[in-house]
Image (cartoon, rainbow, N blue to C red):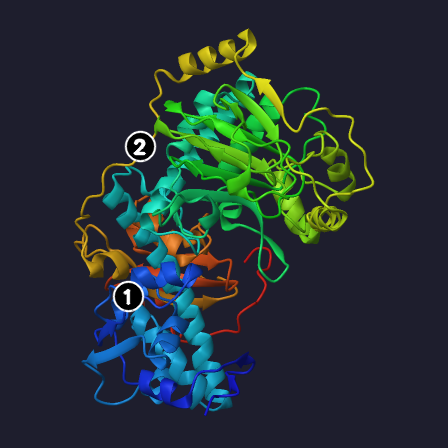
């Protein structure tokens, strides 16, 4: 029968037999995954971790702990052997002062066992130690992953790799986007210092680094036989349940978002600059969208193409009122070279991209449906990233900048009513009247001022080559090195996270050996191994470190100097735990 609760509050639909089975799993338990049965974000994640041959590898390749339960219970995951001879021993776990002697996999599996087998007091004690151990392990694993990603994709400085991975991202995408973020940061710093506009040349430097996912969802733009397109959206998106949210790209890569937004702000025509508002930016690479209408964009959009290509003009039907089937539209669209300027158009009217050769990127700035439902805090975050977030009043004005479509065929009263209702659902205020005479506007970027800007930018960056991603290469790091830490010469790397002991909320002895600066043990160990610490600490071989998370001090020591550290800081028992959350007092 399904368990009603896991732990104190966590509801579950997993069976007791599923949890019972996990007690016998271990890191090297052999597994086999069935062909991918999932969709959306789960599909992307499953596609990665289903290549695993063991439980440990599955977690390494992106499986969430809950994925193990779900996949096993639904028959997607088969257990092939190398089980524990006896189930996980909760009594043994309870005796441990901390969980650092366990592998990350064992900590994950232990948490499953604790949820269903431990009693109240035992559950609370073990769970607290497990959660602390898992947090430390995840932090360490993220740092090692960065080293691996950098080695695999030829990035010289591992610190340039993002340590947070989005739901749709794999290692390659993270590597590309991390460098795009840094390139965007450098461009923004340069233009602010020079007090000038962002150029196409500079925007393209960042776009060429951006890591696109294989987007299988945009079927309305895919040509026949195509299974995916390179298309991402930065900003707001709406879900199928009527909600709106910020896409992970805007949260994870704020400098990249700021660059895209600043380019538009710098290059909009003066008569529309104060008026145009947008919530989202669609980024496209190297595909010609087939004839389609956008489903529910609110108001007009700006579109611009970048890169070196031939063809690729936007073909647009400005009088399309959606009453005519796409295949019955007249063969006389407005064709515009949007590489030479910025075009304001209504994406809800029919449009397509002409075939092209070469490298072509396009940006579409638009407003997502139900944008007003986004929480105020999220709207503020987008504004900080450069979005001009709309209100219902500003969108009402924006609707009037384009003439409404006249239609290509006569429509009945019933059809007109249906079309008006459809427009109303997309956010259009039907009572407003537009003085515009055309269903689009084009702002040319071929003038002298624009040419001078591009020339100045190219000259500035001539001696500064853009970052680049190398072709994928096998990193000389095995699985243990990647996820459990590199094996190092003891003398070369004498400090380790496991060599530490709890001091408490105050340091009463050895105050001259407090290491100031790092916020936790992991960061402290890195500084100590880099020898970027006072000579007295290096000579002693031990120091005190304050953790901002647990609000207590820890003694870190070199191998073999544990007792020396305990004596130096007056620690009677290095295994004693204190209640977390103790506030640090001045002078401690």
Spot occupied by residue 209 in the image (x, y as percentages of width and height):
37, 34
Badge 1 density bin: few <14, some 14–19, many ≥20, Cα 10 Å: many
Spot occupied by residue 323 in the image (x, y as percentages of width and height):
64, 44
As drawn, the label of residue 50 is 1
Using residue 81 as the reference point, say whether residue 588 is left or right of it.
right
The residue at which mark 2 appears reads as 468
How far apart are the two marked residues, 1 and 2, measured between alpha carbons? 30 Å
The first of marks 1 and 2 along the sequence is: 1
Q: Quadrant of the C terminus?
A: bottom right
**Quarter residue 100 falls in:** bottom left
The image shows residue 52, relative to residue 527, as above or below, that is: below
Q: Nearer the viewer, residue 2 or 574?
A: 2
Q: Nearer the viewer, residue 553 or 183?
A: 183
Query: Can I make out residue 523 in this image?
Result: yes
Spot occupied by residue 313 in the image (x, y as percentages of width and height):
46, 26
The image shows residue 463, relative to residue 328, as above or below, that is: above
The image shows residue 558, relative to residue 444, as above or below, that is: below
Q: Residue at x 40, y 80 (%)?
A: 112
Badge 2 density bin: few <14, some 14–19, many ≥20, Cα 10 Å: some
């Amino acid at each position: 029968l399904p368990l009603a609760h896991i732990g104190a509050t966590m509801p579950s639909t997993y069976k007791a037999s599923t949890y019972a089975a996990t007690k016998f799993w271990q890191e090297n338990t052999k597994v086999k995954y069935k062909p991918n049965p999932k969709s959306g974000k789960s599909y992307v994640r499953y596609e990665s971790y289903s290549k695993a041959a063991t439980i440990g590898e599955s977690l390494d390749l992106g499986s969430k702990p809950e994925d193990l339960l779900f996949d096993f219970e639904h028959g997607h995951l088969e257990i092939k052997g190398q089980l524990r001879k006896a189930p996980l021993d909760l009594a043994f776990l309870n005796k441990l002062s901390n969980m650092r002697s366990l592998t990350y996999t064992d900590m994950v599996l232990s948490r499953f066992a604790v949820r269903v087998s431990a009693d109240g007091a035992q559950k609370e004690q073990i769970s607290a130690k497990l959660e602390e151990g898992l947090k430390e392990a995840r932090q360490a694993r993220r740092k090692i992953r960065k080293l691996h990603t950098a080695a695999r994709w030829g990035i010289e400085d591992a610190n340039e790799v993002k340590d947070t991975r989005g739901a749709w991202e794999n290692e390659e995408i993270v590597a590309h986007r991390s460098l795009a973020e840094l390139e965007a940061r450098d461009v923004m710093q340069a233009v602010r210092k020079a007090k000038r506009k962002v150029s196409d040349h500079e925007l393209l430097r960042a776009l060429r680094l951006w890591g696109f996912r294989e987007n299988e969802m945009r079927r309305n733009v895919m040509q026949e036989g195509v299974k995916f397109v390179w298309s991402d959206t930065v900003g707001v998106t709406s879900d199928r349940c009527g909600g709106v949210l910020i896409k992970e790209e805007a949260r994870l890569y704020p400098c990249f978002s700021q660059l895209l937004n600043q380019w538009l702000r710098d290059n909009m025509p003066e008569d529309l600059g104060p008026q145009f508002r947008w919530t989202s930016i669609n980024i496209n690479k190297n595909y010609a969208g087939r004839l389609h209408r956008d489903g529910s964009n609110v108001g007009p959009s700006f579109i611009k193409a970048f890169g070196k290509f031939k063809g690729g003009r936007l073909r647009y039907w400005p009088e399309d009122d959606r009453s005519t089937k796409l295949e019955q539209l007249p063969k006389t669209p407005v064709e515009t070279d949007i590489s030479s300027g910025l075009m304001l158009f209504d994406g809800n009217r029919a449009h397509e991209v002409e075939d092209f050769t070469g490298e072509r990127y396009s940006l579409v700035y638009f407003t997502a449906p139900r944008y007003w439902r986004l929480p105020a805090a999220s709207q503020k975050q987008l504004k900080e990233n450069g979005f001009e977030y709309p209100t219902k009043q500003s969108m009402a004005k924006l609707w009037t900048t384009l003439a409404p479509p006249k239609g290509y065929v006569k429509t009945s009263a019933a059809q007109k009513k249906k079309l008006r209702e459809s427009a109303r659902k997309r956010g259009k205020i039907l009572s407003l009247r537009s003085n515009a005479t055309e269903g689009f506007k084009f702002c040319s970027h071929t003038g002298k001022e624009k040419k001078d800007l591009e020339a100045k930018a190219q000259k500035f960056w001539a001696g500064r080559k853009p970052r680049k991603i190398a072709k994928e290469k096998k990193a000389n790091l095995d699985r243990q090195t990647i996820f459990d830490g590199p094996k190092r010469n003891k003398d070369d790397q004498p400090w380790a996270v496991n060599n530490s002991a709890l001091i408490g909320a105050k340091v009463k002895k050895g105050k001259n050996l407090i290491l100031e600066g790092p916020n936790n043990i992991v960061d402290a160990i890195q500084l100590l191994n880099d020898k970027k610490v006072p000579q007295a600490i290096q000579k002693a071989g031990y120091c005190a470190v304050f953790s901002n998370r647990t609000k207590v001090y820890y003694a870190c020591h070199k191998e073999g100097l544990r007792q020396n550290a305990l004596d130096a800081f007056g620690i009677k028992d290095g295994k004693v735990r204190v209640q977390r959350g103790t506030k640090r007092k001045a002078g401690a």
